Image (cartoon, rainbow, N blue to C red):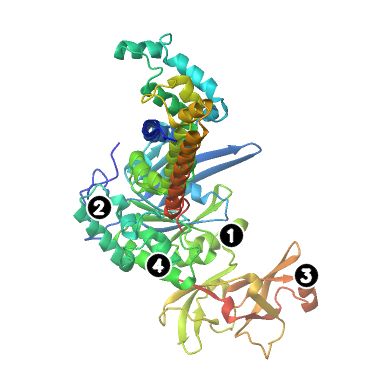
């Protein structure tokens, strides 16, 4: 079986039939990751079975699910740190694991970039030495060159001589990311790498990673349990629950299509819409977005649905995604006045459905919005399908996500 | 009150030889103990720990028998060199290695096992072979344990008595160590000389350990990366 590690990190691993590509010069997509495997963990009195079958094309694929769902195990199987009981894992034509052939490529030869949740920076080595660790097969001059290039790409050049304990969390994150990328991996595995960072640091790092991915089109498997990150990053989402893939597709498909209870629950936003930026008010820290209405949910005479949302970095006319939790929406039976909430949207109750002690009301206001209320609220408001209502939504209950 | 410097140098020589050999053979053994998944591992760990609880005379007795002309090992050595291993410096080294084995291997194994497994995994994903991972990641991060194990086996060999007496006897310049010298002086009621030698050994051992633990403090703390 051929070795995925090449001597020259500037070239990507190529399918045996294809001519050599230089990914620094063009951004030809690398081969996709295809995995289908089963792994059983048994301990006295408990058993966990992970069954996963998916493909990850170049670009971000989000592995999403609650803790204990098996997300990290999926990454470990791809990296070779855990050996599945059966199945097959390949990157293009290269076989990483094939149970039928009793073949498992050693971890060191898989050329998999792996950023662990704990980052796992070598504490006894400087940032630069950490970066060069994966380049030991190269002459020293080349090593320096590659390390320095990636140090600059991730804006950590000034940290080269520091030790991991001397740098901040965000900086450690960048170093770990750079270290896994400098070996020019065929696939990148990220295990909740940004969980501990603040939003600003996080989005900067994601921007840099996206930029890197534009030039190096390899599959990135990104594990997260953060709902926001799913929409911020996801070109494709795999929802994992209790060792099984509950759903996969684009973030929109996964949430829209079959309203699987687990998925809706995991994702947390019962209401997700595309919206176009209509006006920006930087001085107030807000902007106005027009919800893109679907014809099937059109509501009689109402005009466009406008939402005041928090300000994010997005130009006029650009399309974003808005997520609103059903529990964050208030329902009024007459036009409310004297409210701090900025969004009051007229609509009509489309359906009422009781689930345990919660009433799920679907309100048609140009789009269909789901809101949750108590039984007492339903009764005191005399809500019934067809009833005219107003939806009240605070500006900061509108969660904006990059499309 | 003359100190028997010959015995002192001999002991020092013995301790250095033993701790050096233990570093070389103890490290692979500790590595195996730290990382092996074998179910019967506990048996090996128990054997390694035996010298801690065994009376030195018991260990010394068996080593003496094993080195003597009646055992295959002893016969092989005699056919090779023409003399027996018992009552020689080499025999003393072998006995001391066995006696000090747990003092080296246990700290080694504990610190090797204490290295964050994620660092080992990270090294592998970065293309490092197991050997390279050992020398570039595991060993550097285990330095405190390696120093401790080497220092303990050194100090333990410096002060050993029972095994030396059983295996080596009391031949000046060959097997007569400081602790045997002290025993001899006491037997001869030369308490002043015994005291001087004992004090020297005490001070030396203390200085050694203090130095080692002092150095250890500044060395990398074993643990996960920040």
Q: Which residue is mark 2?
A: A9
Gap in Å between the C-alphas at discs 4 and 1? Answer: 25 Å
Q: Are marks 4 and 1 on the same chain?
A: yes
Q: Are marks 2 and 4 on the same chain?
A: yes
Query: Which quarter of the rendering shows the N terminus of chain A?
Result: top left
Q: Find residue A375 and name its label.
A: 3
Q: Closer to us: mark 3 or mark 4?
A: 4
Gap in Å between the C-alphas at discs 2 and 1? Answer: 39 Å
Q: Which residue is mark 1?
A: A266
The answer to whether the residue labelled 2 contacts the one labelled 4, judged by CB atoms less than 8 Å apart, is no
Task: Using a 10 Å C-alpha cutoff, classify the residue at mark 1 as few (fewer than 14 neighbours), some (14 to 19) or many (20 or more).
Answer: some
Chain of the residue on which disc 3 is drawn: A
Q: Which residue is mark 4?
A: A205
Gap in Å between the C-alphas at discs 3 and 4? Answer: 45 Å
N-term mark: 4 or 1: 4
Image coordinates for residue A190, horizontal then vertical, percent: 43, 56
Query: Which quarter of the rendering shows the C terminus of chain A?
Result: bottom left
N-term mark: 2 or 4: 2
Q: Secondary structure at mark 3?
A: helix
Q: Secondary structure at mark 1?
A: helix
Q: Residue at the location (47% across, 63% down)?
A: A194
Q: Nearer the viewer, residue B110 or A245?
A: B110
Q: Is residue A361 left or right of residue A24?
A: right
Which residue appears farthest toward the top when viewing the image?
B70
N-term mark: 1 or 3: 1
N-term mark: 3 or 2: 2
Gap in Å between the C-alphas at discs 1 and 3? Answer: 24 Å
Choose top left, top right, bottom left or bottom right for residue A87. top left
N-term mark: 2 or 1: 2
Q: Is residue A12 left or right of residue A195?
A: left
């Amino acid at each position: 079986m051929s070795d995925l590690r090449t001597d020259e990190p500037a070239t990507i691993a190529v399918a045996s039939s294809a001519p050599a590509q230089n990914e620094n010069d063009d951004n030809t997509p690398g081969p996709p990751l295809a995995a289908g495997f089963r792994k059983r963990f048994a301990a006295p009195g408990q058993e966990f079975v992970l069954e996963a079958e998916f493909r990850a094309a170049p670009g971000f694929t989000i592995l999403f699910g609650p803790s204990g769902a098996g997300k990290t195990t999926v990454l470990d199987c791809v990296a070779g740190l855990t050996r599945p009981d059966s199945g097959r894992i390949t990157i293009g034509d290269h076989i990483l694991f094939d149970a039928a052939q009793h073949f498992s490529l050693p971890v060191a030869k898989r050329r998999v970039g792996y950023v662990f949740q704990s980052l796992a920076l070598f504490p006894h080595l400087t940032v630069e030495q950490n970066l060069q660790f994966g380049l030991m097969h190269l002459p020293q001059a080349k090593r320096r060159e590659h390390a320095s290039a990636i140090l600059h790409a991730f804006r950590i050049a000034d940290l080269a001589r520091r030790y991991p304990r001397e740098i901040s969390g965000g900086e450690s994150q960048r170093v770990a990311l750079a270290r896994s990328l400098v070996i020019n991996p065929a696939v990148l595995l990220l295990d909740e790498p940004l969980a501990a960072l603040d939003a600003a640091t996080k989005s900067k790092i994601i921007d840099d990673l996206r930029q890197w991915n534009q030039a190096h089109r390899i599959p990135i498997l990104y594990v997260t349990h953060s709902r926001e990150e799913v929409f911020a990053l996801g070109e494709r989402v795999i929802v994992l629950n209790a060792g099984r893939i509950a759903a996969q597709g684009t973030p929109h498909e996964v949430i829209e299509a079959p309203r699987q209870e687990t998925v809706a629950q995991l994702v947390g936003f019962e209401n997700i819409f595309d919206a176009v930026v209509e006006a920006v008010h930087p001085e107030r820290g807000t902007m106005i977005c027009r919800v893109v209405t679907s014809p099937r949910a059109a509501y009689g005479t109402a005009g466009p649905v406008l939402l005041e949302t928090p300000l994010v970095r997005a130009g006029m006319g650009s399309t974003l995604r808005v997520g609103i939790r059903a529990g964050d929406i208030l329902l009024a039976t007459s036009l409310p006045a004297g409210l701090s909430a900025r969004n009051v949207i007229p609509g009509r109750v489309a359906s009422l459905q009781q689930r345990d002690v919660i009433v799920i009301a679907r309100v048609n206001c140009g789009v269909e919005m789901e809101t949750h209320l108590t039984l007492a609220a339903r009764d005191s408001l005399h809500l019934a399908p067809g009833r005219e209502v107003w939806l009240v939504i605070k500006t900061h209950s509108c969660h904006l996500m990059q499309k | 009150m003359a100190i028997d410097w010959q015995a002192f140098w001999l002991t020092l020589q013995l301790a250095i030889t033993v701790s050096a050999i233990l570093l070389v053979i103890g490290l692979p053994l500790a590595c195996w103990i730290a990382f092996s998944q074998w179910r019967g591992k506990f048996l090996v760990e128990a054997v390694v720990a035996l010298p801690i609880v065994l009376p030195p005379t018991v260990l010394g007795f068996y080593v003496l028998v094993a080195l003597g002309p009646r055992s295959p090992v002893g016969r092989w050595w005699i056919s090779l060199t023409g003399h027996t291993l018992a009552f020689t410096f080499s025999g003393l080294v072998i006995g001391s290695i066995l006696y000090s084995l747990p003092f080296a291997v246990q700290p080694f194994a504990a610190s090797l096992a204490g290295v964050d497994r994620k660092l080992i995994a990270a090294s592998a994903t970065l293309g490092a072979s197991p050997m390279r991972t050992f020398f570039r990641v595991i060993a550097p991060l285990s330095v405190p344990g390696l120093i401790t194990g080497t220092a303990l086996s050194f100090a333990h060999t410096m002060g050993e008595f029972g095994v030396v007496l059983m295996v080596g006897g009391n031949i000046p310049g060959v097997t007569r160590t400081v602790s045997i010298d002290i025993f001899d002086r006491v037997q001869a009621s030369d308490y002043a000389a015994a005291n001087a030698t004992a004090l020297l050994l005490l001070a030396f051992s203390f200085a050694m350990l203090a130095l080692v633990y002092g150095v250890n403090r500044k060395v990398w703390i074993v643990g996960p990366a920040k």
